[in-house]
């Protein structure tokens, strides 16, 4: 009786520990960058506050580093639009977010902000931090970059 109970206990533990072990595995599946020399992406960013801005800038940086770790050269553009464009002004942006943007620019990531959005949300373009490029309309950026093979990722 004891032997049967022990066998059932071992079987139970083994059966239910396999999904836990599989869930802990970190892998990008079938190597999404296999055969690529460059990975091109444009991020459509519409974050409303500094907390989400910082979170997503860290995520974009982690994505950049993940591409590099796979031996691929990232070509990235981060385009800001919507009311969150206010977050990119010298009077609003906090030092952590500004440092993250400087770091991305240093790595070659293009950061841009939409002049249509700055007009609609009454942002003085002279207050946009210098690392960020003012473009006439980021919708034009999305069209142009997508037609050149850039993937688009929307961040809200």
Image (tube, grey):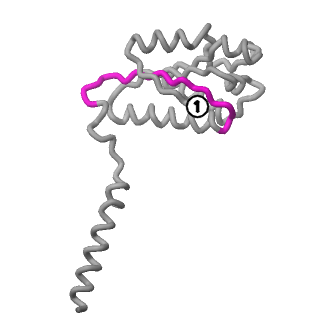
Is 13 positioned to the left or the right of 147 in the image?
left
Mark 1, other Cα within 10 Å: few <14 / some 14–19 / many ≥20: few
Is 90 positioned to the left or the right of 33 in the image?
right
The one nearer the camera, 143 or 109, is 143
Quadrant of the rendering where the N terminus is positioned: bottom left
Report if residue 48 lies within the magenta region. yes
Q: Position of residue 10 (x, y in %)?
A: 27, 77
Q: Position of residue 56 (x, y in %)?
A: 56, 35
Disc 1, SS: loop
Q: Position of residue 64 (x, y in %)?
A: 45, 31
Which residue appears at 59% of the width and 32% of the height?
100
Number of numbered discs present? Answer: 1
Which residue appears at 48% of the width and 27% of the height?
153
Q: Is 101 drawn above or below residue 1 in the view shown?
A: above
Q: Position of residue 21 (x, y in %)?
A: 33, 60
Which residue appears at 63% of the width and 33% of the height?
53
The one nearer the camera, 74 or 154, is 154
The magenta segment is 34-51
Report if residue 92 lies within the magenta region. no
Quadrant of the rendering where the C terminus is positioned: top right
Q: Is 19 drawn above or below residue 43 in the view shown?
A: below
Q: Dot 1 corresponds to which residue?
A: 156
């Amino acid at each position: 009786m004891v032997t049967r109970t022990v066998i059932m206990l071992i079987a139970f533990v083994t059966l239910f520990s396999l999904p836990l072990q599989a869930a802990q595995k970190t892998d990008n599946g079938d190597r999404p960058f296999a055969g690529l020399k460059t990975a091109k992406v444009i991020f459509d960013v519409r974050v409303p506050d500094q907390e989400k801005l910082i979170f997503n800038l860290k995520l974009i940086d982690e994505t950049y580093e993940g591409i590099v770790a796979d031996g691929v050269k990232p070509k990235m553009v981060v385009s800001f639009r919507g009311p969150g464009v206010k977050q990119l002004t010298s009077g609003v942006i906090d030092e952590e977010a500004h440092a993250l943007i400087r770091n991305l620019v240093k790595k070659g990531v293009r950061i841009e902000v939409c002049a249509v959005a700055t007009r609609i949300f009454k942002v003085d373009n002279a207050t946009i931090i210098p690392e960020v490029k003012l473009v006439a309309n980021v919708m034009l950026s999305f069209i142009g970059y997508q037609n050149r093979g850039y993937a688009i990722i929307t961040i809200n």
